[in-house]
Image (tube, rainbow, N blue to C red):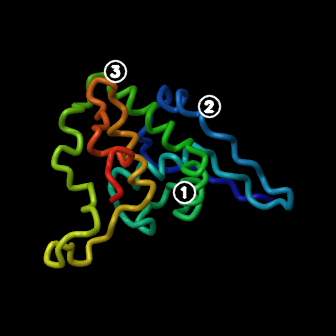
Protein backbone atom coordinates (compact mmCIF):
# COMPACT_ATOMS: atom_id res chain seq x y z
CA UNK A 1 0.00 0.00 0.00
CA UNK A 2 1.36 3.43 -0.98
CA UNK A 3 2.08 5.91 1.76
CA UNK A 4 0.08 9.15 1.47
CA UNK A 5 1.29 12.61 2.40
CA UNK A 6 -0.68 14.73 4.86
CA UNK A 7 0.28 18.42 4.97
CA UNK A 8 0.45 20.00 8.42
CA UNK A 9 1.64 23.55 7.92
CA UNK A 10 0.07 27.02 7.80
CA UNK A 11 -0.25 27.83 4.07
CA UNK A 12 1.24 31.09 2.79
CA UNK A 13 -0.93 31.11 -0.34
CA UNK A 14 -4.66 31.63 -0.37
CA UNK A 15 -6.85 29.26 -2.38
CA UNK A 16 -7.50 32.14 -4.79
CA UNK A 17 -3.77 32.64 -5.36
CA UNK A 18 -3.19 28.93 -5.92
CA UNK A 19 -6.08 28.85 -8.42
CA UNK A 20 -4.15 31.40 -10.49
CA UNK A 21 -0.87 29.52 -10.19
CA UNK A 22 -1.99 25.89 -10.54
CA UNK A 23 -2.36 25.89 -14.37
CA UNK A 24 1.34 26.81 -14.70
CA UNK A 25 2.51 23.55 -13.12
CA UNK A 26 2.31 20.16 -14.80
CA UNK A 27 0.81 17.50 -12.57
CA UNK A 28 3.47 15.12 -11.24
CA UNK A 29 3.26 11.65 -12.77
CA UNK A 30 3.65 8.44 -10.81
CA UNK A 31 6.52 6.26 -11.94
CA UNK A 32 5.62 3.33 -14.19
CA UNK A 33 7.53 1.11 -11.75
CA UNK A 34 5.19 2.04 -8.90
CA UNK A 35 6.32 3.78 -5.76
CA UNK A 36 4.68 6.47 -3.73
CA UNK A 37 2.00 8.76 -5.06
CA UNK A 38 3.66 12.06 -6.09
CA UNK A 39 3.17 14.94 -3.67
CA UNK A 40 0.84 17.68 -4.84
CA UNK A 41 2.47 20.71 -6.51
CA UNK A 42 0.93 23.15 -4.04
CA UNK A 43 2.62 21.48 -1.05
CA UNK A 44 6.03 21.60 -2.76
CA UNK A 45 5.49 25.22 -3.80
CA UNK A 46 4.59 26.12 -0.22
CA UNK A 47 7.85 24.49 0.93
CA UNK A 48 9.79 26.56 -1.62
CA UNK A 49 8.00 29.72 -0.47
CA UNK A 50 9.00 28.93 3.11
CA UNK A 51 12.62 28.66 1.98
CA UNK A 52 12.41 31.97 0.10
CA UNK A 53 10.81 33.72 3.06
CA UNK A 54 13.20 32.54 5.76
CA UNK A 55 16.38 31.93 3.75
CA UNK A 56 17.24 28.89 5.87
CA UNK A 57 19.17 25.78 4.86
CA UNK A 58 17.09 23.08 3.18
CA UNK A 59 17.58 20.77 6.14
CA UNK A 60 15.74 23.37 8.29
CA UNK A 61 12.47 22.94 6.36
CA UNK A 62 9.93 22.27 9.14
CA UNK A 63 8.04 19.04 9.50
CA UNK A 64 4.65 19.17 7.88
CA UNK A 65 6.10 20.31 4.55
CA UNK A 66 7.22 17.77 1.95
CA UNK A 67 10.80 16.58 2.32
CA UNK A 68 13.55 19.04 1.47
CA UNK A 69 14.78 16.76 -1.34
CA UNK A 70 11.30 16.65 -2.91
CA UNK A 71 10.95 20.45 -2.75
CA UNK A 72 14.48 20.90 -4.14
CA UNK A 73 13.82 18.49 -7.01
CA UNK A 74 10.61 20.32 -7.96
CA UNK A 75 12.39 23.68 -7.65
CA UNK A 76 15.00 22.51 -10.17
CA UNK A 77 12.36 21.13 -12.56
CA UNK A 78 10.25 24.28 -12.40
CA UNK A 79 13.24 26.60 -12.75
CA UNK A 80 14.54 24.69 -15.77
CA UNK A 81 11.10 24.93 -17.42
CA UNK A 82 10.76 28.67 -16.48
CA UNK A 83 7.57 27.78 -14.59
CA UNK A 84 8.93 29.12 -11.31
CA UNK A 85 9.78 32.49 -12.81
CA UNK A 86 6.31 32.76 -14.38
CA UNK A 87 4.65 31.87 -11.05
CA UNK A 88 6.77 34.54 -9.37
CA UNK A 89 5.59 37.10 -11.94
CA UNK A 90 1.95 36.15 -11.31
CA UNK A 91 2.40 36.67 -7.56
CA UNK A 92 4.28 39.95 -8.06
CA UNK A 93 1.55 41.17 -10.42
CA UNK A 94 -1.09 40.45 -7.81
CA UNK A 95 0.86 42.30 -5.13
CA UNK A 96 1.40 45.21 -7.50
CA UNK A 97 -2.35 45.40 -8.26
CA UNK A 98 -3.04 45.57 -4.54
CA UNK A 99 -0.50 48.38 -4.17
CA UNK A 100 1.69 46.26 -1.88
CA UNK A 101 4.95 46.78 -3.82
CA UNK A 102 7.05 49.93 -3.82
CA UNK A 103 9.07 49.52 -6.99
CA UNK A 104 11.33 52.52 -6.32
CA UNK A 105 12.65 50.86 -3.17
CA UNK A 106 13.41 47.45 -4.66
CA UNK A 107 17.10 46.61 -4.31
CA UNK A 108 17.90 50.32 -3.95
CA UNK A 109 21.27 49.78 -2.32
CA UNK A 110 22.53 47.50 -5.15
CA UNK A 111 24.30 45.13 -2.76
CA UNK A 112 23.06 42.19 -4.83
CA UNK A 113 25.23 43.19 -7.81
CA UNK A 114 28.66 41.51 -7.88
CA UNK A 115 31.66 43.68 -8.71
CA UNK A 116 32.94 43.27 -12.25
CA UNK A 117 36.18 41.30 -12.34
CA UNK A 118 36.03 40.96 -8.57
CA UNK A 119 36.84 43.55 -5.96
CA UNK A 120 39.88 44.43 -3.94
CA UNK A 121 41.20 41.66 -1.73
CA UNK A 122 40.20 43.61 1.38
CA UNK A 123 36.68 44.10 0.02
CA UNK A 124 35.77 40.44 -0.34
CA UNK A 125 33.27 38.98 2.12
CA UNK A 126 34.71 36.84 4.88
CA UNK A 127 33.24 33.49 3.97
CA UNK A 128 29.76 34.79 3.11
CA UNK A 129 27.77 32.41 0.94
CA UNK A 130 26.56 33.68 -2.41
CA UNK A 131 22.83 33.30 -3.22
CA UNK A 132 22.08 30.40 -5.54
CA UNK A 133 21.04 30.60 -9.21
CA UNK A 134 17.31 30.43 -8.50
CA UNK A 135 17.57 33.39 -6.12
CA UNK A 136 19.10 35.49 -8.91
CA UNK A 137 16.29 34.48 -11.29
CA UNK A 138 13.66 35.54 -8.75
CA UNK A 139 15.46 38.84 -8.15
CA UNK A 140 15.56 39.47 -11.92
CA UNK A 141 11.84 38.77 -12.30
CA UNK A 142 11.15 41.04 -9.34
CA UNK A 143 13.18 43.89 -10.80
CA UNK A 144 11.71 43.59 -14.29
CA UNK A 145 8.13 43.23 -13.07
CA UNK A 146 7.22 46.91 -13.12
CA UNK A 147 6.70 48.48 -16.54
CA UNK A 148 6.70 51.99 -15.05
CA UNK A 149 10.19 51.79 -13.57
CA UNK A 150 11.83 49.22 -15.81
CA UNK A 151 15.52 50.07 -16.35
CA UNK A 152 16.46 50.86 -19.92
CA UNK A 153 19.78 49.84 -21.44
CA UNK A 154 22.19 52.66 -22.19
CA UNK A 155 24.55 52.92 -25.11
CA UNK A 156 27.53 52.77 -22.77
CA UNK A 157 26.49 49.33 -21.51
CA UNK A 158 26.19 47.86 -24.99
CA UNK A 159 29.11 45.67 -26.07
CA UNK A 160 28.50 46.61 -29.74
CA UNK A 161 29.27 50.29 -29.17
CA UNK A 162 32.63 49.61 -27.48
CA UNK A 163 35.89 49.77 -29.31
CA UNK A 164 37.84 46.49 -29.47
CA UNK A 165 41.25 48.11 -30.14
- CA separation in Å, label 1 and label 2: 18 Å
Q: Position of residue 68 (x, y in %)?
A: 52, 63
Density class for disc 3 (Cα within 10 Å; few <14, some 14-19, many ≥20) is few
Determine whether label 1 and label 2 are within 8 Å by CB. no
The quadrant holding residue 22 is top right
Around disc 1, counting alpha carbons within 10 Å, would you say few (fewer than 14), some (14 to 19), or many (20 or more)? many
Q: Where 118 falls versus 159 (above or below)?
A: below
Quarter of image, res 118: bottom left
Image x and y of residue 149, in percent: 26, 28
- Rate crowding at label 2 as few (under 14), some (14 to 19) or many (20 or more) other CA atoms within 10 Å: few
The x, y position of residue 111, in whole percent, is 21, 55
Residue displayed at 54% across by 57% down: 71
How far, Cα to Cα, is label 2 from label 3?
20 Å
Query: Which badge, 1 or 2, is on the more N-terminal residue?
Result: 2
Q: Residue at left 67%, top 40%? A: 26
Residue located beneath label 2 in the image = 23
Q: Relative to residue 138, is residue 121 depicted above or below? A: below
- Chain-order first, disc 2 or disc 3: 2
Q: How far is mark 3 from mark 1, CA to CA?
A: 29 Å
What residue is shown with label 1? 71
Residue, disc 3: 97
Amino acid sequence: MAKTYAASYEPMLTDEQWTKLAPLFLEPVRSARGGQTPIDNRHCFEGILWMLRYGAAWKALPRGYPSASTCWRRLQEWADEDVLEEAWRVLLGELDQRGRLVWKECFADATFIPAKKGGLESGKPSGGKEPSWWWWRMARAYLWGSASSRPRPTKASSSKSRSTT
